[in-house]
Image (spheres, rainbow, N blue to C red):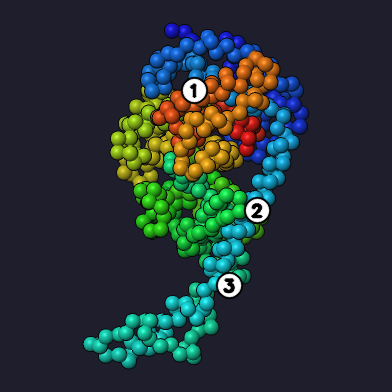
Amino acid sequence: MDLEVKGVAASPVSQTQPCSGRKNPLQQGWTSKSWAMENPCLPVVPRLDLGSLVDSDEECIQDAEAIVDDLTTLDRKALLQHGYADNPYTAQRTTRKSDAEVVAAEKKKQTVAEQVMLDHLSRAVISDPEQNLTTEKQEIAHILPDSKMAPIRFRKRTLHETKIRTQSTLTENMLSHKVQFDGRIISRNGHDACRELVGFFFTHDQSLTIYEYRQFGKNRTNVLPFIQKSIYCHQHGRRKGKQYQLGDFYIGANLTFLSSEHPRLPESIKENTVLTLRITNIDRGASDSLKTDSVEHDDINNQEANDRLVFKAIQDVLKEQLRKRGVRIFTGLGKYLQQLDKKRNGLLEKADFKQALEVFHLEVSENDFESLWLILNGNGDGKVDYGEFRHAVVGEMNEYRKSFVRKAFMKLDFNKTGTVSIIDIRKCYCAKKHPQVISGHSTEEEIKSSFLETLKDACIKSDEVSYGEFEDYYEGLSIGIIDDEDFVNILRTPWGI
């Protein structure tokens, strides 16, 4: 059965540019080329005739064979979200909200920094465990082999045996040589993925610590250690086994830790052997001023650069194919791989990935696939995380874009459960400022219904949306949008963030 949307322009949003005054993008998302602005007027979008849309089982994303080269009804409905990209009506409100967000972010960073200093400077030198070592050595020298030694708490340490300063004693000056960064957990668990993490890397001993910032209501906050201060090494990738150094900290970098070494982590995180954190923001001033003492591993940097070239070559081949179908294919690929994951551990074998690429008609040459597999399967166990594989093949939105996706979901998930009901999404989604609604060509309900239909198609359950599914939807939508600010408007306008 042939399906069509009467009068809907399916051209990408990049062909219609907003009025003058656009800001330069902070960071390109899917391409490195800048985009020229030629049309100063808003696009006139014809009326959407939803009455002509007929449901068809052949277009269900769960039936992988239904994926064809032509745009489907779901593709066209997803492209309607591009209409928010060129919206001049939110400029003043966006400026006010951005200013408030900057103030709140600085206040959060200051609160966490003060707590870190307090935690590491509050311990008195006299109570340092190192103070007991000298006394213990003296007692061992005078004790008989067959006698029993009293516990430390019963031993006496005189004042002249107490050190003024121990090796582990920290001073405010030592802790001041640090780089502060924000991070997030890479996880399909919505509650964990939305945790607000703030980390510190101390250059005096190459150690790091990460704290979790929690806010309850408007005024109550809580700051607790998430990763204890210590010296750590990479646990995944080309740098596995290498100690963390200053050059490893930049926006988009991954920090990996063994979950078994941190018993206080939540159970949902300890289910995975390796905990992966992504750096989302960093104090560039402090980082640049301290980089003179950093030593880089040139051989590893070259290998990682070659890896990125392999990924980019594959993504460039698939980019045009995914530009208008990103939502349907990206979310469908995720659901398909999840169905193949019978053990529910997020890992699949080479044959599974080849099968998925073939089913979704994503053509990757044999040589490119083997190069890709060699990089991802670095530990040689024959299994790779399918989330990592999907981003390597299709690409991943930058952290600037993803920060707004997280903001939107966190606004919806006020109970912080990691899932949001479709009912709550319907209540919060506002289509009032969509160009078709403003021009009178469509109603708010029509635009809202189109969005909900495409979003539900990306979900396993029909009545709720998980964070991973919400992120996948906008990950797919991001593929066809060149400018960062266009993508941000698509999130800001309907969600009010």
- Vertical arrangement, residue 24 with respect to residue 17, above or below: below
Rendered image: mark on residue 453: 1
Q: Residues within 10 Å of mark 3 (few under 14, many from 20)?
A: few
| Residue assigned mark 2 | 106
Q: Is residue 411 visible?
A: yes
Residue at point 47%, 33% (across, down): 421
**CA distance for labels 2 and 1:** 39 Å
At label 3, the amino acid type is Thr
| Residue assigned mark 3 | 171
Would you say 296 lies left or right of 152 here? right
Residue at point 49%, 24% (across, down): 454
- Vertical arrangement, residue 156 with respect to residue 435, above or below: below
- Quadrant where the image shows the C terminus: top right
- Vertical arrangement, residue 289 with respect to residue 51, above or below: below
State the image coordinates of residue 229 (x, y, percent, origin top left): 48, 63
Counting residues from the N terminus, which is met first, the one under dot 2 or under dot 1? 2
Number of labels in the image equals: 3
Would you say 440 lies left or right of 372 here? right
- Vertical arrangement, residue 76 with respect to residue 2, above or below: below
State the image coordinates of residue 290 (x, y, percent, origin top left): 62, 60
Towards the viewer: 114 or 18: 114
